[in-house]
């Protein structure tokens, strides 16, 4: 997070940071809200936050669900990659089912949900390039309950997303 008074130029010693700050300041806030979800039972907080943010912003919400197969995951003989399309389609179907009641609760929000194969962080950062806000979740640390920590996906999105990021705690 970069905190500085509005209109203050970014530090001159970091050209990359200066460029990113200027791009963020020029960003069109009419872009969609992007939310990264898993399909677990704790997704409700992320979805509620994302739908409410989309309702007060552009009215557009893009839901991204990703599954990153384990290293060496091969389905079928000879490395047949058709399984990727099947899994992406199954993920998209599950996302649509999950979003149905939320779409009824927020009829003014146009929602587009889809499933992806690959790194959730990469897909969310790419989607954030056109977004006015990226919404992600943060689970409670199961080893150190009560201690606020983020996982690797939230960490990567916070560091690399060109759009503002909202991290929603999940139970």
Image (spheres, rainbow, N blue to C red):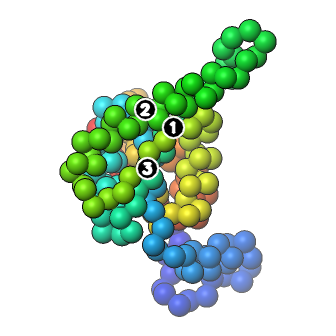
Residue at the disc numbered 2? 93
Q: Nearer the viewer, mark 2 or mark 1?
A: 2
Q: At which x and y percent is residue 49?
A: 31, 55
Find residue 12 and report its image quarter: bottom right
Q: Which mark is residue 153?
A: none
Q: At which x and y percent is residue 104?
A: 23, 48
Q: Rounded to the nearest whole Å, what is the CA distance between mark 2 and mark 1?
A: 8 Å
Given residues 2 and 62, the one toward you in this image is 62
Residue at the disc numbered 1? 115
- Image height of 71 relative to 49, above or below: above
Find residue 58 and report its image quarter: bottom left
Q: Rounded to the nearest whole Å, what is the CA distance between mark 2 and mark 3?
A: 12 Å
Considering only order in the chain, which callout, 1 or 2, is on the residue closer to the N terminus?
Answer: 2
Whether residue 40 sits left or right of residue 128 in the image: it is: left
- Image height of 149 relative to 126, above or below: above
Considering only order in the chain, which callout, 3 or 2, is on the residue closer to the N terminus?
Answer: 2
Quadrant into which the C terminus falls: top left
Q: Which mark is residue 112?
A: 3
Whether residue 167 sits left or right of residue 12 in the image: it is: left
Cβ–Cβ under 8 Å for marks 2 and 1: yes
Spot the residue most to the left: 105
Give neighbour class at mark 1: few <14, some 14-19, many 20+ (Cα, 10 Å).
many
Q: At which x and y percent is residue 122?
A: 62, 47
Given residues 97 and 121, the one toward you in this image is 97
Q: At which x and y percent is residue 108?
A: 27, 61
Count numbered badges in the picture: 3
Spot the residue most to the right: 78
Mark 3 falls on what kind of element? strand
């Amino acid at each position: 997070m970069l905190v500085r008074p509005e209109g203050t130029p970014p530090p001159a010693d970091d050209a990359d940071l200066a460029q990113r700050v200027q791009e963020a300041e020029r960003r069109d806030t009419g872009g969609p809200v992007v939310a990264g979800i898993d399909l677990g039972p704790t997704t409700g907080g992320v979805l509620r936050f994302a739908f409410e943010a989309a309702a007060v912003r552009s009215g557009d919400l893009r839901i991204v669900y990703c599954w990153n197969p384990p290293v060496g995951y091969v389905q079928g003989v000879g490395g047949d990659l058709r399984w990727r399309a099947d899994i992406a389609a199954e993920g998209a179907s599950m996302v649509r089912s999950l979003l149905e009641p939320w779409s009824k609760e927020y009829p003014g929000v146009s929602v587009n949900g889809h499933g992806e194969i690959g790194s959730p962080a990469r897909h969310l950062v790419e989607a954030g390039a056109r977004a006015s806000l990226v919404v992600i979740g943060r689970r409670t640390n199961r080893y150190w309950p009560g201690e606020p920590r983020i996982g690797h996906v939230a960490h990567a999105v916070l560091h690399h997303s060109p759009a503002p990021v909202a991290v929603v705690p999940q139970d």
